[in-house]
Every structure is written in C-alpha cells, then in structure tokens.
Image (spheres, coloured by chain):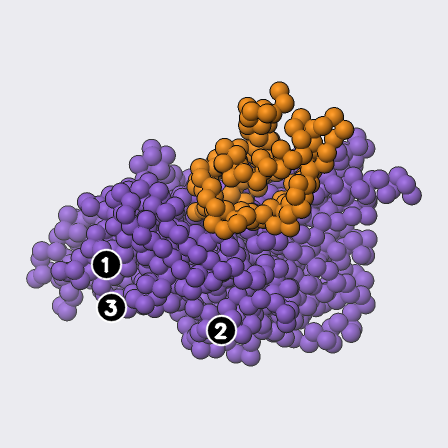
Chain colours: A orange, B purple
Amino acid sequence: MKLDIGGNETFSISRQKLWEALNDPDVLTRCIPGCKAMTETAPDAYRVEMQLRVAAVGGSFEGAIALKDKEPPSVCTISVSGQGTLGNGKGDARFEIVELEDGGSRLDYSGVGEVGGLVAGVGQRILGSVSRNLIGRFFTGLRKELEAAPGGKA
Amino acid sequence: MNAPSKPFRFVSSNRRVREDRRFVAGKGRYVADIVLPDMLHVALVASQYPAARIVSIDSSQALAADGVHAVLTGEDLAAATDPLMNGLDTPRVKRYPLAVDQARYSGEWVAAVVADSRALAEDAAELVRVDYDPVAHVVDVEEAMGSGSPLVHPAHGTNVLLDKTFNWGEVDRHFSEAAHQLDFRVTWGRNSTVPIETFGVVAQWDPWAEMLDVWASIQMPKYSDQIARALRIPLNKVRVHQDVDVGGSYGVKRGIKHTVLAAHLARTLGRPVRLIEDRLENMRAGDAHGPERIFDVSVAYETDGRIRSMKMRATDNVGAYAGRAPFQLGKPIGAIVGPYRIESVRYQARSVMTNKTVQEAVRGFGQSPTNYAIETAVDKVAAALGMDRLEVRRRNFIESDQFPYLIPSGTRYDSGDYHTVARKVVDAIDYKALIEERDRLRGEGLLAGIGIASCLEPSGGNSSFEPLLNEKNETTTWMDSCRINVDGLGYVTATIHTTSAGQGHETLTSTVLGEVLEIDPERIQIVRPDTLSSLPSNSPVGSRMAIMLGGAAFKAAEKLKQQLVAIGAHRLGCEADDARYEAGAVIAPDGKRIEWAELVNIAHRRYHDLPPGMTPGLEATHIMQVPTGGKLPEDGRVQMYPCHSFEFHMLLVAIDPVLGKPEIRRYVIGHDCGTVINPHIVKGMTLGGIAHGLGAALLEEFAYDAEGQLLAQSFMDYLLPSSHEVPHVEIVHHCTPSPFTVFGQKGSGESGYLGAPAAISGAINDAVRHLGIGFHSLPIRISAIGDTVAEASDTLKKD
C-alpha cells in the first residue's frame, strides 16, 4: 500500500549543524527508531539493520539508505528500501532545511513510500499513524541528540 | 420414488444429531489432536510481492537455527513431485505447493521450514533470505484480459484460462420479439466460508511398509488420488484416515498443496510431519478465497413482466493458478434460469488469472453469485415496469404441474411448488403489513426496504460441469457408497467413506438404516474406514450426501433386508416373496416368525440352515450412481445435478441514513428440500447459510490494494457476521418430494446462502431507490451506504 508522509520540524540550531547531524551515520543510528546498526557501504550509501513492531507484527528488517541530489547545506533526497520476513518497503523523501531569522532552522520534508508483505496486510489500518509516530520518535531523538551535543543551543 | 407406504418412523422426526454430543462436549477428534512420536512441524516463508522472480534463497541461517531439520524450496520440491492436478486442459499453468522460480501472489509459499516445534520453525522462517526481483503484476480482472497486461503465467500466453460461450435456445429471436430489454452489471466480491479450524495435515511415511499415512482436515473429492499422482506413488500406498473430525469447511478444506508438501517432507526426512495453517496462512494462501465475479446481464421481457431470454457474461477473477475455480462457472449452468420459465439463455463463462490468491471451491460452487445476478435482473424488470417484485416472480415461476421441467441448458428440474412456498412466506410475514411497516419506518426518517429472492439449490453433486467445460474429461459418475455389516452378536455397523465437516453424516446414515431396517438408529454403529479399506466416495460436496450417502445406505439396507427375508423364509419353509419383514423379524403368511437373533445366528454359524447357495455372514454393499447422471454433454447441454431445492427469502431492512448501517428487522425464508431426514441439521444449515449470505452481502471481502497486497487477512479487516448483525430468522417449511431419491429428499447443505445475498442486496436497493442511487457490487459496506446516501441527499437538496 502507498504511504504519504510530510511535515516540518523547527530546531534551535543552525542550518549547518542540522545538516551535519543528518549526514552523520552515528547520529542517525541513535535516532532512527529500532535502528540496530548502520554501516556505510559507499559514499552516501548505508546498510541498516532494524528491529520494528507494527500492530501485531514485529520483526527484523534489513535495508539500504542512499542520500542523493545533495545541495549542502539545505536540500537532500533520501531513498530507503528495506525488507524483512514480515514485510518490505521502499520510498523516497526529500527534505529542505530553511534558515530561520532567530538563527534556528526548519526542516521541511515530504515523501511517498510503498509497503508490502504482512506489515501492509495486517497493519494497514494503523500504518499511517505508525509512520507518523516513527517520524515523531526520530525527531524527538534527534532533538535530544542535538541538545546534548556540545555547542548545541540549550 | 421408493418411499415406503407407511409413515416414517425416524426420517423427518425430531431426533438429536448424534455427532453433536462429542462436539458440544469438546471431544471431537480433529487433526490437531493427532500427535505422533517424533513429529516435526512446518512453517512457511511467504512471498511479500504479488509478482516477483525468485533470484535466490539463502537458507543457511535458518538451517543453523535451533531445532531446524530442513528448509525446502519450490525448486527442490518440483524436481521430486508432479504438478498439482488441474481439471482444465491448461498444461502450461503449472502449480506446485511452493512457488517455483516466480511468486505469483502476495502470500504465496516460497519455502518451507521444518523444525522440532512450530515456534522454532516460525523463528527460523524469519531467517530465510529470499532475494526477489519484483515484476509487473495485475489484480484487476478486466485489465488482465487486455493485450498489454502482465502475464501471470507467461508460458500460458494469456491470463485467460477459459472463455466459452453457450447458446441455449433462440436468444436472438426472443430478444427481437420481446417488448423491452435492459442491461446491467453487478459484481460479487471475493469472500469465503472461513471455518474456525484452519486446514491441517499430518503425514507419516513408513519405509518398511511403503505406506503413506495421512490425517487431514479435508473435504475434497479424489484427495488420495491427487496425493498419489503428485508424489508419483501407487494409490494403494496412500492411506488417508477418515476418522478425523473436520472443524468446518463448506468447500475450502482442499489442502492438496499442504498435503503434498507435508508428505514429501515426511518421506525425505523419515519423520512424521505436521502442517497446520495459522490464520494468516489460511487467509492469504490457504484455499480460502471464493469466487470474485463480474456479471454483465441483459434480459428481454414483456410488458406483463414475463422474462423471455437472458444473456449473461460471467467474468471470474480466479487468482494466480487454475485451482478448482473455473468449474465454479460451470455448475450454475444447471440452474441458469433459476426458478423461472426463461426460454433461452446465452452464457459466456470467462475464467481469468490475476496476481491474487488462488480461488477455490466455496459453498454453492458459484451458484450464489449467479443467483444474485438473476435476482437482480428480476428486481430491475419489476422496477422498469413499475410492478411489484413479488408479482414479477410469480408471473415467471415454473408451475408445479410442469415438472420434471427441462431448462434451456439441458437440466431437468425434478420437482417443486414455488407458488405455494412463496405464498406460505407471504402469509407468514404478512407482506401487506410488511409494506406498511416499511413505509412507516420511512415516515420516521429511516431508509427502509424490502428484499425478495427466490432461487434454487441444485443438489446431489455430480461433476457434469467437468466434461462440459473440458472435452478431454469424460467423467460421468460421481458415486458414493455404504456397506452394512451385521456381526455375529447381531449388532449393525455401517460405513461412511469420507470425512465430515459438521454435516451430520453419522446421523444421516443411521437414520436411513434405522428407517429401512426398522431398528433403533441409536444402536447402529457408524464407522469411517481409511481410504484403502473404503468403497468409492466423492466426499460431501454439492449438497449431495442426503441424496447419495442416504441413497447408498437405503439401497444397501434393502439388500440386507432381502438376505434376512431369504434366510427367514427358508427356515420357515415358505417362499421369500410370501414372507414379510417387520422390525428385524421375518414373518411367514401363517404368522410364524423368526426373530433377528436367530436370523443372525443362522447367517453366522448355521450354514446348514442357510438357503442353498447363500454365502455366510450378513453384509450388504451399495455403490450408488448419481440419479439422472451418467451421460456426456451433447451440444453444450447436460443434466447437471438431479435435485433442486427451492428457497424463498423475504426481509425488511432499516438503515439510519446518517450511519449507513443496515439493520434487518424481519427475515422469513421458505424452504423446500423435499423430505427432510433430520430437521435439526436442515435448520442449522439454513440459519448458518443466511448468516453466511449476510456476510457476503454486507461485510466479507478479501480486499486487495492496487499494489497487489491482500489487505483483509485477519479478522480485524475481514469482517464476519456476529450476533450483532445476524437477525432472528423464521423458517417456513414445505415438502415437495423429489421423484429421483429414495425418500424424496433433496440437498440442503447450501440452503440460505444461495438466496440471502440477493435478498439483502434487494432490500438495500429498495431502501435507497428514491434517492436515485443503487448498489451493484457486494459486499455493500456500511461506509459505501453512508457516503453514497450522504452524497445523494446533498444533491437532492441542491436540486
């Protein structure tokens, strides 16, 4: 089934710092919900291992993340594909970081994905809210990460 | 009809169903109760894609996991077995239990993992890494027929499995003569029967006896034949144990791919292997899915409401393999005009593959969808002429003095009295008062509608549709059997040569035998020999067992009675023709009698007292041919089933226009299945059938998204009717005996289901007609009613 995501998130750190954080595999590993490991396989390409649960369906997933069409420090497209025994998914999301007048930054993102397998069949009713929840958890983690980092504005 | 002149003692009487005792007490013996020493368990790896080439399968991690004994792929299995049987002549549509090279629907089994427990097998199944290369898929049946469509089986060259047009009678002339005609399209959604027990099988191979033993939750004709063929072993090396209770079926307990898979694993691993589907496996890749059909219908009719002719094109989405589905377009040919005097019919049957789960047999074998299309046509004729729907039906009914009645497609209906059954229902429900009640509800601001459906239940399960749709198939018998043995102590034991899925065959057989032999049915033991000890049976399909097993038991009992009379007459010194049989005793014209115990004693011990030439012991067997069966089709016409039960539905539905939720306020069904053998069984079938039909009409659908993913694979999304939806149903009985059966009985295993969807759809359409809208596809969901009604109300307000 098809899945649309989109939204924006405001940070108190500068555009440059946010850009760096979003390009740092270690930061992402800590912030992506259920992410166990993220290994660089080529420049801007990573292999990820995840452990996720959607409704009654939980399991491990292996996936690939690629960053494309980069325009530092503001625009980037992320391609994600993954599969596990319980489902598969792929999608493209584009994000853009906008500088704010107060020195902070805003991340605008939108994307489409397609999910298949058991996760789609059993979890379809809640997949939309689950994806919003996962994205929310990602940003919560990211915010915590950036606040804890030295130099981040508290 | 051979009905005895005296009134029935046990047949039709209020006797409890003997199987119910063990079921109610929770003491049935199901396949999950079969636990063999050293038994291994199977879990399955399912395809996540509707269409994908299997690039590679890496089993190494799974094989290294705890308790894992084997991982089997489709490639391995295909090398060791033959493709599963397919009744059509489509050799390039090959089907194996596991996908070979390519997965063709989401959920299709790609590999099987065998471990010490099901839990370990499931854990290891997650470790099997399948590398897929997704390819284009198609789920829409009309798209699948288009020239640019992806092919489900490229080797077959098309997605069309069957496209056959029959012309019965002068369709074109009747269409040109008739004063009016109308066309419409209705769609039947993919639904099923969803038994509580999923399919399960236990297989064991004994290399020293060279014997495959199988216990299964099965309801399928020629099951062991198909196992033997697929495994390339002699049929007398396959022993299916039939003393396993089947926890519900109505067609969907096919299980051949499960069985071939488990049997192959048992043979190669040298251990018993058990495969029991979980609900997800059952819903997405078991044999759960029924017909999904588009009907394009035209009818030609006169101003007085008489329907002269019908053109029907049925396009069936059968999913990814041939399965049993194409024949579900064939059986309805035997009742293609319903209970009506339609003079001619053109019928086009199209069976088309898509990347969906394989369609298998479901209750009615295609008849309920067809009845829905026919009944919609009748309602539309009534609406077009501004006539009452009941009156249009009455004007088209076959009259009771016209039986046996030959319909254009070659079947002769046995008997019926449709007017009387309809009148009984109209009286019971008080049709005039029902209309007033409907109008009163409308006055209160509710949507309210009356639904009417009259239809037939062809019964006595033959397989004439096989030669009709596939000329290479010459099957003209679909026999069933019974053997009676009276032991040396005088006790009676009789055999059933199939499993049962709750139809009460033990009650049926003992009641029939008790009736003929005039002994208490409770004292008759009924057993189910394994298939190697069995006489031919074609299993309980097509509402056939009252007719076929009941008939075989009757005939065997008559033979046994003849033996008893011969023994008694010889001992009494009179002619057998002069002696009579009464409640186990043989009585000479002079009143002298020999009791049961002595007759048995003579047969088993006193050879010197037996009539010359008679063999010792007391045993009788009858293998019964389907009444009226036995001929190949001629000119596209064939006698399909022998008997035709009739049902007449009438109901009142009320819908809150804001919520869109239909509520059935009153439901009466008139039912005529000839002589009823056990009233409880018939009642249970009818009530369950209406609940099942309600599910088809309003709730149940194996829905797919455009990406080919099955969205309704748990009971959260596949909605079954519950006590909240199922109304109180009143049954009105009528009995028109069949001239072709031993007691005048007809079938009733599909009753209720065959007309309920049509009737409920009719009621909802009656409720919304004044809004200028209609619902032409099932299920009619609450959301569809709510949205469509809201939209129509807005439009009306604007105008």
Identify the residue under disc 2: B155
Read off the chain for label 2: B
Closest to the observer, A14 or B353: A14
**How far apart are the two marked residues, 1 and 3, measured between alpha carbons?**
14 Å
Q: Secondary structure at mark 2?
A: helix
Q: Are marks 3 and 2 in contact (CB under 8 Å)?
A: no
Q: Earlier in the sequence, mark 3 or mark 2?
A: 2
Residue B334 shown left or right of residue B581 in the figure: right
Q: Nearer the viewer, mark 1 or mark 3?
A: 1
Residue shown at 55% from the left, 48% from the top: A44
Dot 3, crowdedness within 10 Å: few (<14), some or many (≥20)?
Answer: few
Q: Report which quarter residue B418 is drawn in.
A: bottom right
Residue A44 in view here: yes
Residue shown at 21% from the left, 52% from the top: B271
Q: Secondary structure at mark 1?
A: helix
Viewport quadrant of the N terminus of chain B: bottom left
Amino acid at the residue labelled 2: Ala
Identify the residue under disc 3: B234
Closest to the observer, B184 or B549: B184
Amino acid at the residue labelled 3: Pro
Identify the residue under disc 1: B267
Read off the chain for label 3: B
Q: Earlier in the sequence, mark 2 or mark 1?
A: 2
